[in-house]
Amino acid sequence: MNSTDFILAASESVNPLLPNPWEILVTGVGFAVLLFIVIKVIAPKFEQSYEDRVTAIEGGLEKAEAAQKEAEETLALYKAQLLEARTEANRIREEARSEGAQILADLKTKATDEATRITEQSHRQIEAERVAALTSLRTDVGVLATELASKVVDEALKDDARAQRVVDQFLTDLEAQQNAGASN
Amino acid sequence: MFAFALPMASEEGGFIPPSVSDTHLPEIFPWFAEYGTGFGKQMVMIVLSIVLITWFFTKAIKNPKLVPSKTQYLAESGYAFVRNGIGRDIIGEKNFRPWIPLLFATFFFVLLNNLFGAIPFLQIPSFSHAGSAYAMAIIIYGTWIAVGLKNHGIRYFKLAVVPSGVPGWIMPLMIPLEIISNFIVRPMTHSLRLMATMLSGHIIVMLAAAGARHLIVVQDSLAMNGLGVLVILGSVAMYFLELLIMVLQAFVFTLLTAIYLQGAIEADAH
């Protein structure tokens, strides 16, 4: 094919609007083939890939939401537990304080009782000793009196009349004392 | 062979600009020629585009990962652009799913074939040939009419041509206009818009190449040679403009497809 052919072709002046039927055929069939491939293979795969991605992203979001919710629940639980523990601690502290006070009061009462008891015991002992002393004193006084009496009697025998009176008196007293002791 | 398809006719002195005829390239199988211009480079590119689209997208999504690889991400972005940016936004959340494959195939088929015009040696947008653009427009024309008939029965034609909320006396004017605009002009504009923009872009490339070659090789004057270099520099800017138009036209073609489908699905809504 040389340049002369082109000149000839150019001079014939082809109308660009007139189609070459073979081009219509090739384009039409070619596009039909392409469309078939796209419908059967390409479009479904792209749609599938798109769907998969949507599912994955939505799934991921849901998972994240669930995790967050769980975390919040755990946090709330921990907070509640902490509060409970604090209340418990306070309660125990209060209890210990009141218990301590109770113990102290008990001890005080006990000590007071003990002191009272000891005091009473002392009193009783003193009383007993006083009684004992009184008893022994009375015995001693009798002996001394008798001794004194015998001395007095010894002396008084020299003065008859007075001695007589003393002896009488003494006897009377003794008698009265004996009566009182008997009635006692 | 293809790269030399630009005209070599200027040796005799005068500059002969390349014409539309030069977009019809020599046949690979000349025995088809009796039906037209035969099975040529343009058809090879159509087939090549189908192979490339299938290869790229099946490979990209072969092992889909949740965290995509670069290839997968690129392919998914492209898919999502057509699916959501064109399909869902135009046709609507309720009805767009069955039309994703059609829109997807249309967009990438047109896009890749347009971009062929920007690739050296291929260097011709497949849709600068009217036949291919017509084929696509016919397929989509048939599709949306079928959708309208399937959704609304024969009443669809009434819905499509009788505008609602228009006073009765204007109907004799409106109905013929609607018939012409919806059923005659629509597929023509749909295909010719694509074909014309691609063809004009291609002619600009040919003109720039032929002109620059003429100025540099044939002309003796240094100033003319320098001008040829300027033409080449200018054609670089044109190249990027063409690149933009190629993507834009693929988008527009697919967008209109979606709009026509939406109109057919919800013919009773307006």
Image: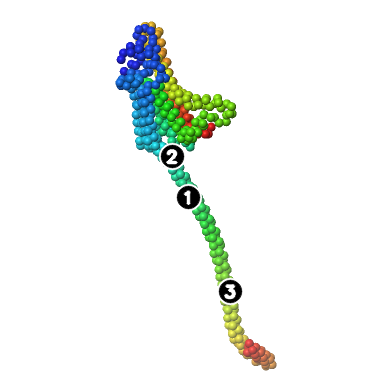
Dot 2: chain letter: A
Could one spot residue A134 in this view of the protein? yes
Q: For the residue marked with disc 1, what is the amino acid?
A: Thr
Q: For the residue marked with disc 3, what is the amino acid?
A: Glu
Does A39 sit above or below residue B211?
below
Marks 2 and 3, how far apart in space? 97 Å
Marks 1 and 2, how far apart in space? 30 Å
Residue A74: which disc?
A: 1
Dot 1: chain letter: A
Question: Which of B116 and A100 lies nearest the eye of the viewer?
Answer: B116
Dot 3: chain letter: A
Could one spot residue B262 in this view of the protein? no
Disc 3, SS: helix
Residue A120: which disc?
A: 3
Q: For the residue marked with disc 2, what is the amino acid?
A: Val
Tell me what residue is drawn at x 34 percent, y 21 percent: B35
Which of the two discs, 1 and 2, labels the residue nearer the N terminus?
A: 2
The quarter of the picture where residue B14 lies is top left
Residue A56: which disc?
A: none
Tell me what residue is drawn at x 42 percent, y 18 percent: B200
Q: Residue B11 at x, y = what percent? A: 34, 9
Q: Residues within 10 Å of mark 1 (few under 14, many from 20)?
A: few
Q: Residue A114 at x, y = what percent? A: 56, 70
Q: Mark 2 points at which residue?
A: A54
Question: Which of B184 and B230 lies nearest the eye of the viewer?
Answer: B184
Disc 2, SS: helix
Circles 3 and 1, Cβ within 8 Å, touching? The answer is no
Tell me what residue is drawn at x 50 percent, y 26 percent: B179
Q: How crowded is mark 3: few (under 14 residues within 10 Å), some or many (20 or more)?
A: few
